Structures are given as C-alpha cells and as structure tokens.
Image (cartoon, helix red, strand yellow):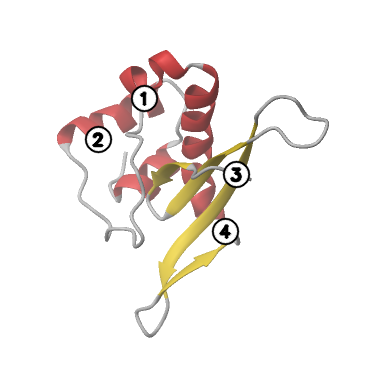
Amino acid sequence: MANAPKKIQVGNICLNIWSNEPKGERKFPTKSISFEKRYQDKEGKWQSSQSYQPNELIKIQIAINEAVRFLFLKEQAEEQAEVPVEEVKDEPEPAKKHSVEEIAKYRAMVEEKVLTPKGFKAITGEAY
C-alpha cells in the first residue's frame, strides 16, 4: 500500500512522490512518481488531468528538478530549493503574484541556463 504522497506544486502542475511499502518478494520500500494538472472547468469545479500543453513543460521540468533534490539530496533540498516545495491543498490557489525574491530566483535560473526566457515568462507572466 502506498503512503500519502510528498507533493510538489509548480503553478497548476502537481508532482506526487509516493512511498510504497515492501510487497511480496520485494524486501525494501520503493518510490513512484505521478503528475497531475489541476484546473477549473466551465462550472468552476476543480478537475485533474494528465494532459499537458507545451508551455506547461517548464513547470513539469521544475517539479522534476525539485523531486530529484528531494529524493537524492534530501538534506539540502529545502535549503537550496530554487522553487519552494509546498504542500498542496485540495484546490490550488489562484495564480499569485510572485515576490521580488521569487522573481530574482527565476532570473538567476535563466542566467544559469536552467530556465529559458520563455519559461520565465510562462511562470511569472513577465518578460525576461
């Protein structure tokens, strides 16, 4: 049985890291990963999807980078995270305005060639 997931959310994209208990011949716990996109339908009801638009790939990439940090660099993950790791609520919050510090982090990611200027705009809504 899988335990409750560690959730990493970037915008409307959520990456779940599941911890799976040993089962059958497998004598050690394993991890599995799933993605979902949360959105509101025409009636305002929250829905999930596993289908993504090309402009959402950068959000998926950032979530994957955070997952790698969490899974393989646990001690450093929270301290050195480029994107805040947040617990996800049942309904994602509406798009928020990014703080000056967050914008600076995203700008640094562009300068380090981790994030494209187009990705910067997709996340922040601002031109780089």
Identify the residue at image location x=80%, y=36%: 24
From the image, tell me which residue sits under label 3: 2
Say the numbered circle drawn on residue 81: 1
- The reply to whether discs 1 and 4 touch (Cβ–Cβ < 8 Å) is no
Q: How many marks?
A: 4
Q: CA distance from mark 3 to mark 1?
A: 26 Å
Residue 112 spot, x, y in % from top left: 42, 20
Say the numbered circle drawn on residue 126: none
Identify the residue at image location x=53%, y=35%: 64
For this rendering, which residue is in front, 125 or 91?
A: 91
Residue 59 spot, x, y in % from top left: 46, 44
Question: Which mark is nearer the camera, 4 or 3?
Answer: 3
For this rendering, which residue is in front, 24 or 118?
A: 24
Q: CA distance from mark 4 to mark 2?
A: 24 Å
Identify the residue at image location x=61%, y=41%: 33
Name the residue furthest front: 24
- The reply to whether discs 2 and 1 touch (Cβ–Cβ < 8 Å) is no
- The reply to whether discs 3 and 1 touch (Cβ–Cβ < 8 Å) is no
- The reply to whether discs 4 and 2 touch (Cβ–Cβ < 8 Å) is no
From the image, tell me which residue sits under label 2: 103
Question: Which mark is nearer the camera, 3 or 1?
Answer: 3
